[in-house]
């Protein structure tokens, strides 16, 4: 999810070992070029697993003395997703990870590395792999390929993943203690008063903290637009918002991002990752939705906003693109009003 991406905020987030000593040990294995063949990073969404994986890969490829430095070309390549020996497989849109995708990756890493000799494969999240894909991966874990390191991630460690988990070193991310989170956010350049405001409500979830701090930067007009969008309950209101977006296509990205953020906050409340006080200013039907609407429906609406933004970059007719989104919002708002 773009809004949660932390990749541009590095290297302020390099100090993971402060979270717990075990992470420090694992990081040393990478910076000393002695990683084992597979790690399983566990912990709820938003605790920083993906960024930790990139930090570890950086430590392995880094060319500076203090690894990872975050600034050498090797570190930058990993962080920017341009390192050919660092392969990432995601299921960001919730789709499954197929056996073909896994086979393709394993075949790729079985060939010679481009750089220092190591190749790192990141898979997130492993629970999205089909059973076939998991079995295919399992074979590589049972018969490790020389100089290949797997960084597997799971938001939720289930019993079915037991066989994979048993072949990995486990690294567990837990909610961030306030003092470390505060220091990290200060390092990343956020304002102290904003940080204090967020700390008490984010439950140690750095993703939520960043999400909220960044949303604070969205201008108030965009935030008002998002609230208006969530309040659309009749055709007239939909047309009025739709007109605003059509006439102000230049600001549309900001408006759409604000809507995305607002829906995402509701989703976080719905999945108990965020305190309901975060959305106390939302229309009442949204507060109900955040309490009992099916998660899949909130997710689907979020995807619809994503799709609108993606199509904006393409050559799709802007007017029909916007109308489509407004109809979706109107439908969902109406349905949730009846909850
Ligand atoms: Zn470096």
Image (spheres, rainbow, N blue to C red):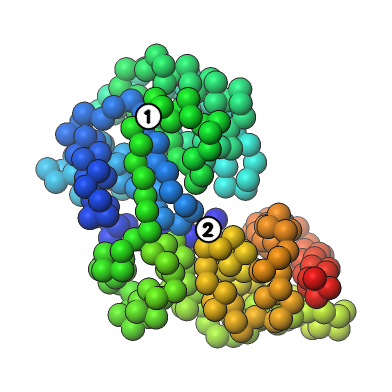
Residue depicted at x 74% and y 77% = 285
Q: Of label 1 and label 2, which has the lower sequence position?
A: 2
Q: Label 1's element?
A: loop
Horizontal arrangement in the rendering, residue 230 relative to residue 149 (left or right)? right
Residue 272: quadrant of the picture: bottom right
Residue depicted at x 53% and y 20% = 136
Q: Which mark is residue 196?
A: none
Q: Which mark is residue 168?
A: 1
Farthest residue, direction top? 143
Say if 51 sits above or below 57 in the image.
below
Percent position of residue 232, x then y:
78, 79
Residue 74: quadrant of the picture: top left
Horizontal arrangement in the rendering, residue 257 relative to residue 60 (left or right)? right
Nearer to the camera, 255 or 129: 129
Q: Which residue is mark 2?
A: 2
Horizontal arrangement in the rendering, residue 239 relative to residue 9 (left or right)? right
Q: Label 2's element?
A: helix
């Amino acid at each position: 999810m773009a809004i949660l991406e932390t990749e541009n905020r590095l290297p302020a987030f390099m100090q993971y070992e402060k979270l717990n000593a075990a992470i420090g040990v694992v990081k040393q294995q990478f910076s000393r070029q002695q990683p084992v063949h597979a790690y399983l990073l566990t912990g709820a969404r938003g605790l920083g697993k993906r960024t930790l994986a990139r930090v570890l890969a950086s430590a392995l490829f880094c060319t500076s003395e203090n690894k990872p430095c975050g600034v050498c070309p090797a570190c930058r390549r990993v962080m920017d997703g341009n390192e050919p020996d660092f392969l990432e497989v995601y299921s960001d849109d919730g789709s499954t990870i197929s056996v073909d995708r896994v086979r393709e990756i394993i075949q790729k890493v079985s060939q010679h590395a481009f750089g220092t000799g190591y190749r790192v494969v990141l898979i997130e999240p492993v629970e999205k792999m089909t059973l076939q894909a998991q079995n295919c991966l399992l074979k590589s874990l049972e018969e490790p390929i020389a100089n290949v390191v797997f960084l597997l991630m799971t938001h939720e460690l289930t019993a079915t993943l037991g066989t994979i988990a048993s072949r990995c070193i486990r690294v567990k991310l837990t909610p961030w203690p306030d003092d470390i989170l505060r220091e990290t956010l200060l390092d990343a350049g956020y304002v102290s008063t904003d940080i204090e405001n967020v700390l008490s409500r984010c439950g140690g979830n750095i993703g939520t903290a960043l999400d909220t701090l960044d949303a604070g930067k969205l201008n108030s007009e965009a935030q008002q637009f998002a609230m208006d969008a969530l309040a659309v309950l009749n055709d007239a209101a939909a047309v009025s918002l739709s007109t605003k977006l059509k006439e102000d296509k230049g600001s549309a990205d900001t408006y759409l991002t604000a809507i995305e953020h607002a829906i995402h906050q509701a989703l976080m409340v719905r999945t108990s990752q965020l305190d309901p006080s975060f959305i106390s200013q939302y229309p009442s039907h949204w507060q109900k939705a955040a309490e009992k609407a099916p998660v899949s429906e909130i997710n689907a609406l979020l995807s619809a906003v994503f799709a609108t933004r993606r199509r904006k970059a393409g050559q799709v007719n802007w007017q029909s693109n916007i109308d489509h989104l407004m109809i979706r919002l109107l439908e969902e708002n109406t349905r949730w009003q009846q909850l």
